[in-house]
Image (cartoon, grey):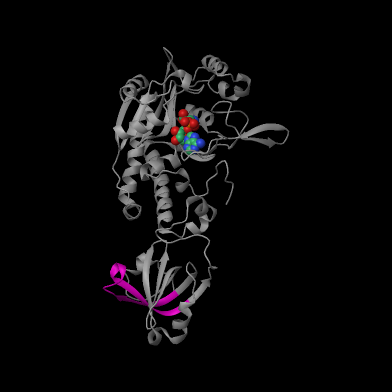
Amino acid sequence: MIRTYIKDGFKKKGKVELKGWVHDIRDLSKIKFLILKDISGRIQCIVLPKESGEEIFKQVSKINRESVVRVVGELQDSKQAIGGKELLIKELEVISEAEQPLPIDVSDHSKTELPKRLDYRFLDLHRPKSQAIFKIESTMMQAYREFMIKEGGIEAVFPSIIGSSSEGGTELFPLKYFEKKAFLSQSCQLYKQMLACSMEKVFTIFCVWRAEKHNTVRHLNEARQLDYEECFADEFKVMDVLARCVQYIVKKIMDERGEELELLDVKLKVPDVKYMTFADCTKLMKKEKVHMGKDDLSTEAEKRLGELYPDTIVFVHDWPLAGKPFYIMPKGDGLSGGFDAIYNGVEISSGGQRVHIPDLLIKRLKEKGLNPKDFKGYIDSFRYGAPEHAGWGVGLERLMTQILGIANIREVTLFPRDRDRLGP
Ligand code: AMO
């Protein structure tokens, strides 16, 4: 027999084979229920001594929760069962027994705290709520690719081992690379710029490593970014691309992940877009009596922007040059072509127009205390015909938390890496 997914079973009649995990067993002496789950859903299976056979009737009570089983049976209509169908079991095979006791509570309303759940993430992923998060994440990545391909973007892959910093001197994880000094990539910044100067519109989903020592609910030491870079573009052009991209992602999640959103109790809305300068944001925060930050937005200011403009991507642009990395284009008056995007109270992205003029780049590197010699290949790439260009990077996990309204970034990270966690 060919295995049927539970979801498809509801549309079928007659005999089917299902494979999955035992969610629950209910023993009512004359009738027994086995609730079976797979990635597509759940179904109630019934076991009766006569119809299923005495042996199966005895065997079913001994099966531990979360064990993997194969069942063959007849689908029949049932008024009580969820989905209006149940399976009368005729064959039962335990494929893999789950040891008892389970180290974490995998019920729908699990009481196990997040750190313990993460210690047993493989088992935590038996929970439909955890599965819902990562199904949505998968749709998010698919939507991002779809959007970018429609925009005319070219997907690229970049090195994860770098010889010099790409986001400033700090926060690097050093590693031994034969006789040379090397680091884990902080971003694909320099590579995506070099590529955009010939391939015009490029995008990638890239893993970044940041040796930030603080352990917060918004930071990971290993995170993923949705990166974009476009040539013949300034920051306003790419802010528009970013706004449409996030709107596209949210719309696709709403269209395709309704069940998962309902399970997580999330009511989504395609976000609006708002633009404001850093100076106007400073004035607004003064009025709101919220601490702002001189060259950067404080956490409180981001939070207040989320409260003032819910379900809105707020672009704060004309950012002070002092608060942006060496690769961001100066605009005069201490301002830059850099921006941040705040969504529901958290920075999800930063980006801007880049410096594509070698002499200016050397000056900016020196001003930031970096040695231009370490960036020779990057600087040289702008010497032989390099147009103006701009781009951005969105934190994949941050976008997830902000779409789903989840406070801790670890909840949306399969196997998080933070100051204390290096496994599983
Ligand atoms: P930045 O460092 O601001 O910019 O990162 C871009 C976005 O990535 C997310 N992010 C993080 N998420 C979780 N944990 C972290 N430690 C972490 N660090 C960053 C945030 C942030 O907005 N190269 C530039 C982007 C560009 O200009 O194109 C960059 O990396 O959501």
Q: Quadrant of residue 282?
A: top left
Residue at the outermost front position: 289
175 displayed left or right of 296: right
The x and y percentages for residue 28 are 38, 79
Which is nearer the eye, 235 or 133?
A: 133
Tell me how many marks there are.
0
Foreground of the two, 56 or 289: 289
Q: Nearer the viewer, residue 81 or 207?
A: 81
Is residue 88 highlighted in magenta? yes
Picture quarter with the N terminus = bottom left
Q: Residue farthest to the right?
A: 179
**Looking at the image, can residue 230 be seen?**
no
Q: Is residue 350 magenta?
A: no
Provide residue 70's location: percent of width, then percent of height: 46, 73
**Residue at 69% across, 36% down:** 176
Up-down: is 254 above or below 66?
above
Residue 29, position as x, y percentages in the image: 39, 82
For the stretch drawn in magenta, the main secondary structure is strand
Tell me what residue is drawn at x 58 percent, y 37 percent: 160
Expressed as whole percent of the image width and height from the top left, the position of residue 215 reads 52, 39
Q: Would you say residue 357 is visible in this rendering?
A: yes
Residue drawn at point x = 44 percent, y = 86 percent:
54
Report the magenta residues as a range. Answer: 71-92
